[in-house]
Image: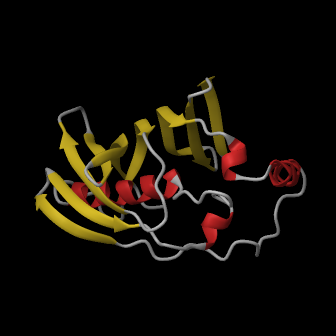
Amino acid sequence: MLAADLESCTDDDVAYAGSATRDGEPVIALEQCLGPMLPAEDFDAPDDLRRDYALLCGAGATPDRFAGLPALHLERGASVPGERVSATLRVPQSAPFFEDHFPRRPVFPATLLLDRQIRLALELARESLAPAEGGELAAVRVLDVKVRSFIAPGQSLELVAERVAAAGWNAKLSARANGKPVATARVEIAARSGA
């Protein structure tokens, strides 16, 4: 079950939170997130947006509509074991998700960026945390997500996950393009028992 809460919305940005649960058990929570607002007509045709909204409110898309994701590999860079790791993510020049995100001005989805940042943080956490037998490490909370600029097809991003002193195991996440900040977040990682 996915849930989203819009905390505020202005002409410039939207503040939101969200969560995912499975069988009533928490999977992950998003807190204190901020994203830019955009002029929709620059990214998608208004009539297409209306049609897609009606589809979402109705029966939904057919299960075979989306063929999946291309491989999004991280090229591991410099690291300090258990403390900091960097990697390069090369955004594909073309991919099926750009058809929906967005037809007039393709943008790499922030959810895919966050997924790769969390994977990098999990690699770092595995260097200093060991779950109990049969367990696994998982991101349980993501905080302070801030998307600062759009990511175009073909861009190369430098991702960094850096452990921060806090209760539990936490990491600061950042993404930069051409030396400029693109997105930041924090993630809390914990051991989960196997299901």
> Is 137 located above or below residue 70 in the figure?
above
Question: Which x, y percent locates residue 15?
Answer: 55, 28
Question: Which x, y percent locates residue 66?
Answer: 70, 72
> Is 66 located above or below residue 87 in the figure?
below
Left or right, 173 with reference to 27? left
- Residue visible at 40% across and 63% down? 155
Viewer-side residue, 95 vs 79: 95
- Residue visible at 81% across and 47% down? 46
Residue 154 lies in quadrant: bottom left
- Residue visible at 37% across and 73% down? 73
Residue 105 lies in quadrant: bottom right
- Residue visible at 42% across and 45% down? 140
> Is 40 located above or below residue 59 in the figure?
above
Viewer-side residue, 159 vs 39: 39
> Is 154 located above or below residue 4 in the figure?
below
Left or right, 19 with reference to 129? right
Left or right, 63 with reference to 6? right
Q: How many marks?
A: 0
Question: Which x, y percent locates residue 44?
Answer: 72, 53
| Outermost residue, left side | 80
Left or right, 159 with reference to 141? left
**Image colouring:** secondary structure
Question: Which x, y percent locates residue 25?
Answer: 56, 45
